[in-house]
Image: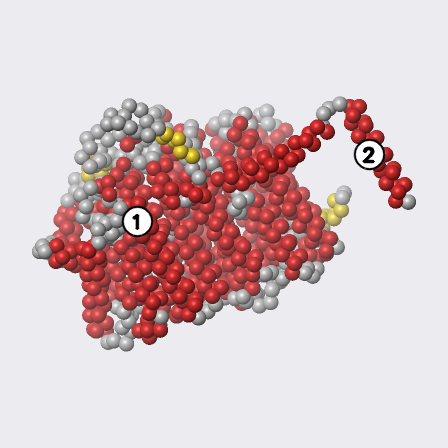
Amino acid sequence: MQQFLIAIALITTGGILAFITRKNRDVSTIVGAGSAIIGSLIAVVPVVRVLFSSVELPLLLLNLPLGQATLRLDAVSAFFSLPVLLLLAVVALFAGIEAAHDKHAHDGWLFFNFLGAAMLLLLVAANAVLFLVAWEMMSVAAFFLIAWRDEIASARNAAWKFLVASHIGTAALMLLFAMLGAHAGSYEFAQFSGAHFTDGMASVAFFLALFGFGVKFGLLPLHVWLPEAHAFADAPVSAVLSGAMIKMGFYGLLRILMLLPNISASWGWVMVAGGLLTGIFAMAMALAQSDLKKVVAYSSVENAGIITMAIGCSILAIVWKQPFIAGAAMAGALLHILNHAVCKGMIFLASGVVYHTIGTRKLEVMGGIARSMPFTATCFAIGATAIAGLPPFNSFISEFIIFVAGLQVATLQEPAALLLAFLIMSGLALIGGLAVATYARTFGLVFLGAPRQEKRHEISDIAPSLRLPFMILLGFILVLTVTSPWLVEILLRVAATLMAGHQGFALADLQGELLHKPLIIVVQFSVALLALVIAGWQLRSRFFSTGDRSDRPTWDCGYAAPDARMQYTSSSFAQTIVDIFSPVVRPYKHGEKVTGLFPQHASFRSDAPDSLLRYLFTPVFGLVERILLPLRGLQHGRLHLYICYVAITLLALLVWKVVAI
Amino acid sequence: MISPSSILICLVMIVLSPLLPGIINKTKAFFGGRQGPPVLQLYLDIAKLLRKTSVYSQTTTVVTRIAPFVILFSTLAAALLVPVAFRGAGVSFTGDIILLAYLLGIGRFFMVLAALDTGSAFEGMGAAREVLYSALAEPALFCGLLVLISETSQTSLSAIYEKLTAECWWQNPMTFLLIAVSWMIVLLVENARIPIDDPNTHLELTMIHEVMILDYSSKDLALIEFAGAVKLAVFSSLLVGLVFSGNELSLPLQLLAFAAAMALVAIVVGVVESTIARFRLLHVPKFIVGSGALAIIALILKLSGN
């Protein structure tokens, strides 16, 4: 436990020192990145110990000036530390090396390290006040990181949206903790679980938590800040925001669920339905986007939807007293959280490399860069295959576990269970199919085909030293895939900790061996597929390629002068799907109709800003502004009138006091 | 669970799978009053292609070279997971159908990428259609599966099919008929057959599957054609296992019955192709969603039956 706190202190101090030495870029980079990396390595030791040995480290009480703070590192905290520590270290490594090469690279070490430290503190906080303080630190640090390029108006705009969204969420959380605290008579989490909440109170608490934490992980319709914040932040920042910070929302939600033993089926249904809608909506939006990083950001929302669905399924299974399903769904959700962090870290870093190399995020003008950037293309391809939930990589394994939970639900002979199984299986299949479309479009139109941009000769792949962070993430993708049958036990231990308040959901009841066996076969198939494909391809290109030639243009059905502009673009690729979802996506379309036999000029443009932002939040916030606008008259800047306000207030208080007596 | 005898049967099925397109074409020729190509035509095509050398476009990258192997091996792996000859699958475990569907998914993903790799407008068009249609077809497949799981309380394909007897059909004839029709549509979609896609059309603008592999030649094309035949066999045997039951037959009879049933599926596909015209592309999504709707009706029937 002390080790964990030393790591937090080290990361924080490193950030402050990097800020003090910011005039000297090299020193500042070494201090900032070095402290984040070393801090993460130190913190990983107690985390691994807790996860593997199931010992709970003792509570630690810190006497602070304003009261006592309780810290605790249990299996849940330890598990959620994994994505944070991994991304903190890898992204610090990436940003550090990048800063050495490029003087425009991101160097906001103060806020980067603060963000990391705040997330770690949040995870060990066992006291509502400390939790909220860490939560706010995290949000404020993230705000400054998103607003880092504040010379760009849209970055400022995105940062404001994030700040507003995150404070609305925090308001709900304050209400939640105030309610729980008032009832339990203490702000210690340990006291909350002992207090007996009525069913009504528990439901209010759950929905406040779902709202407050849902803002962070992007539950529909609270996701609106997410695409823009991720698009306009620098790539290393987006990687940490998407891979780690979003997951803190899930951590908070699961913590609150742990504290409320009287769960109800309606919570599960709300989460399953909410997650399903989030996933489908996010994929439809992703397909309509023309900005590379917005596509990737919407994919984070989609994965949050899948995780929400799985947690909802687990809640329903607890209500229905089905330990295996509850454990499997929760284990799938947890593994998906970890898998998504690894893959999304890789994809955001690779997108950042693409953006820096060709200077645009517009999908329409990209294309064909795989030939000049083979390493980045390979990383993006593996990351994309993985995150689309396809075998042989890690995210398929976590989706498979959730599917197994869904299959088991279908064996229960209950109409409600069949409905749940239908939502999970068909929903996941549809979301998965759309994710395949999204990532085929993203990878295919950015990296493959003929280049659409003009100055292609300048493009070169990333420097060899920058490849190390990618190799580490790649290694994690493979390790997480291959070790998944054994990881299940750790996941189920975390799940059992989460369900400790319920009878009959101990680790032994979750029947991990029922997941272990299928997973072994899945992993065998995955490894065999990978090996056979590589072997077949190598054999073919080494021994069976005599006489092959690759100096001809693409066969374009007899057309003799194919042009890069004739290729299918990203919007034409997605058009049919977007049309199907157009009632919810509501894309803008601008263009002139092509008329006559020999049209001279034609242009077409389409875009899809978030429809919920446009049709829900903008009108609502506009209304609030209109209502509150008259109050602006009070704030006029005339000092004598302000003194008059003070006098009136004092007078009113005096009158009240007199009347009260 | 691994069953060596089923793996052996599965291998035979893989080797014989190019017969299925041959049977379909013979059926179509019969309806057209022609003699048609020989049943073994696909073998001859593959043999010819294997002797040729490849031409790759200048635009292509390693994706084009690696995709045929991803498509082939993922389809072969999927074939190991499908129950054959009423004796269960070569490899069966909880959730095997999920792996089966996603293995076919990775093959499709790479076929789409290879199409985009060429930078051809036509291939991009086919790719865009393929991803949409398969995203719509998969929920229908899983929805039908749910009914079967609920009926048999089993979670692996082999165990489900073992428990699925003629009596189940007699009890809920409508439910199973709806699933069978829904899965038949999924088969047509996934294998790019009429009325969704026409493998024999001459106009690239209207194709889906064929246009995506326009730029492939020689050995790569042979692998893709072979994988396509195996994929057809995988879906056919899924359908055969659903419609026919032969658990209690002796081994030789099972093999004969399975071969006959597979040929029957191919003939049905041939009849469908001969009697229905290809849909306009705009209507295809409605048709596929319709197959999902059939599966949902089956689910509702199952619910009300309880």
Numbered label attached to residue B284: 1
Question: In the rendered structure, which amino acid carries the disc numbered 1?
Answer: Val
Q: Residues within 10 Å of mark 2 (few under 14, many from 20)?
A: few
Q: Which residue is mark 2?
A: A649
- Residue A48 location (% of width, % of height): 55, 53
Instruction: Mark yes or no: residue B138 visible.
Output: yes
Q: Nearer the viewer, residue A386 or A42?
A: A386
Above or below for A447 versus A310: above
Question: In the rendered structure, which amino acid carries the disc numbered 2?
Answer: Thr
**Label 1's element?**
helix
- Residue A296 location (% of width, % of height): 45, 40
Q: Residues within 10 Å of mark 1 (few under 14, many from 20)?
A: some
Instruction: Mark yes or no: residue A307 visible.
Output: no
Above or below for A179 versus B303: above
Above or below for A255 versus A29: below
Q: Nearer the viewer, residue B246 or A208?
A: A208
Q: Nearer the viewer, residue A598 or B203?
A: A598
Q: Quadrant of residue A557?
A: top left
**Label 2's element?**
helix
